[in-house]
Image (cartoon, coloured by chain):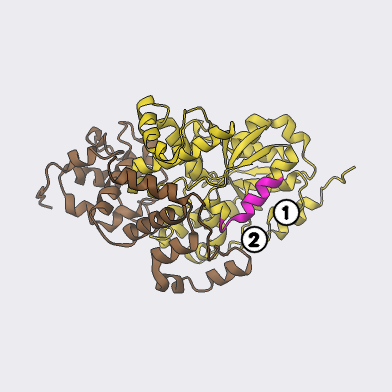
Amino acid sequence: MRYAYFPGCVAYDSCRELDTATREVARILGIELVDLPEAGCCGAGNLQEYSAEAARTLNARTLSMAEGAGADLLTVCGTCQLYLSRANKELQDPAVRERANELLAKTGRRYNGTVKVKHLLEVLLQDVGPRKLAAHVRRPLQDLAVASFYGCHILRAPGSPAAQNPEDPRSMEELVTLLGGKPTDYPGRTACCGFHILTVREDLAVRMSGASLVGAKAAGAQAIATPCPLCHLVLDTYQGKSSRAAREALGVPVLHLSQLVGLALGADPESLGLKRHLVSLKPVVRHVQAGEFVRP
Amino acid sequence: MAVRPESPGFWEEVAAVPGGEAVTACIQCNTCTSSCPVESLEPAFNVRRLVARVRLGLREDVLSDDALWACARCHACIAHCPKGVRPGDVIEALRHLAVKEGHEGPGPRHLRAFVASLRQGGRIHEARVTIDSIGINGVVRQGFLPVRMAMRGKAPTLRAEPLSTAEEIRLLLDAVEGGK
């Protein structure tokens, strides 16, 4: 299994733990990640608003790099997944692709439309598959109560399995169960974290994420897991502000999808960057280490 | 409220921007607003009314409205609209026009900061985008949060390495903006 790996800007910057955890999970599962060191930003909606065509062209550039590597593109961010797969869908139209290629020719690149854009969640459940994934579990999650927080964009990305049933998605819960955790049902699984208005209307963003955090806590979640680092930033880094806005003590640990999987696969917690969070993950690590298998 | 449509052709202008094409298909059913996670917290941001204001030709009123920038891009309205209006994409088109026309405010400022960072490095430099978006005063108002982030090793990098091919990004952005 081989993918062109696109961590996204935030996994290169404030959420570097997502990048290290993803590499660790890939190593354990024998997935080869081909780096695309020159791939740029997906636009995250901002560039799309500035210029839809510029966004499509820059994403065609990234897709052409994956095509050059002869691999599908792997993302670990809901927003990257949405905007790259949207561009890819538009670029399936030969006329649109030709226009993008006219521009890309200035950089000596070309995209023929052959790449698929896949989020890690899809790769784990469909390409790796439940059987192989379960066989690699060395540290079952011990019925850890995990509340999934999908994030809007993975639910809206064309072609993504989580988008097939956006009102009641189940893929995260399926994964949690496979890893030995207990999925927590709560209102807010498919809610919006507010990340994209964090710099413009922080007051709204922390109330939006706060409502989901309060809901997860009330439902008995010991942790939240999210497949999107932007949701993670709001849910974890801004949790203190959400707590003040909601006038409730929260303290809900928030895991990146890669960290949750890495923990269950027996990765050293150090290699998953679990200390790079504002809400401590110690209770989660203690809980799951109790059920660890000793490696032969 | 007496409505004076100063720009009756505004809907055509919006429909010509990518994302705004289906703005006339709206039947004002309110499904978008009902599924919007922002509206219940900030009633000034009302997707259905925004579309209605476009069709009423309230051009300046819409493009200068700060509430236009409260949309969190969750795309729930796009998923739910029964007429294929793609209201979230109409907002994308409206923001495009507002920025192109030089409107100011926290929203346009953030968008410009984002694009400037992308243009410079090819990837987003979070610290720079944040500071350029909310200003030093905004950073000060964050209180101890940046310090707490730094203590966890979670602060964004202060100096980001641009892509060695960042020039390609600028070339493509210029080519698109230049029209050819």
Label 1 belongs to which residue?
A271
Say which residue appears at 75% left-offset and 35% top-offset: A134
Whether residue B167 is in magenta: the answer is no
Label 2 belongs to which residue?
A276
- For this orientation, the residue located farthest to the right is A296
Indicate which disc residue A42 carries. none
| Coordinates of residue A277 in the picture (x, y in percent) | 63, 60
Residue A202 occupies quadrant: bottom left
Q: Is A177 located above or below residue A40 in the figure?
A: above
Q: Could you tell me what secondary structure mostly forms the magenta stretch?
A: helix
Hue used for the chain lettered B: brown
Quadrant into which the C terminus of chain A falls: top right
Which circle, 1 or 2, is nearer the viewer?
Answer: 1
Q: Is A204 located above or below residue A259 in the figure?
A: below
Hue used for the chain lettered A: yellow
Quadrant into which the N terminus of chain A falls: top right
The amino acid marked with disc number 2 is Arg
Q: Which of marks 1 and 2 is nearer the N terminus?
A: 1
Say which residue appears at 35% left-offset and 32% top-offset: A99
Please state if A28 lies on the left or on the right of A280 as rendered.
Answer: right
Label 2 crowd bin: few (<14), some (14–19), many (20+), radius 10 Å: many
Is residue B43 in sight in this rendering? no
Question: What residue span does the magenta drawing correspond to?
Answer: A13-24
Residue A91 occupies quadrant: top left
Task: Give the Cα distance between marks 1 and 2.
Answer: 11 Å
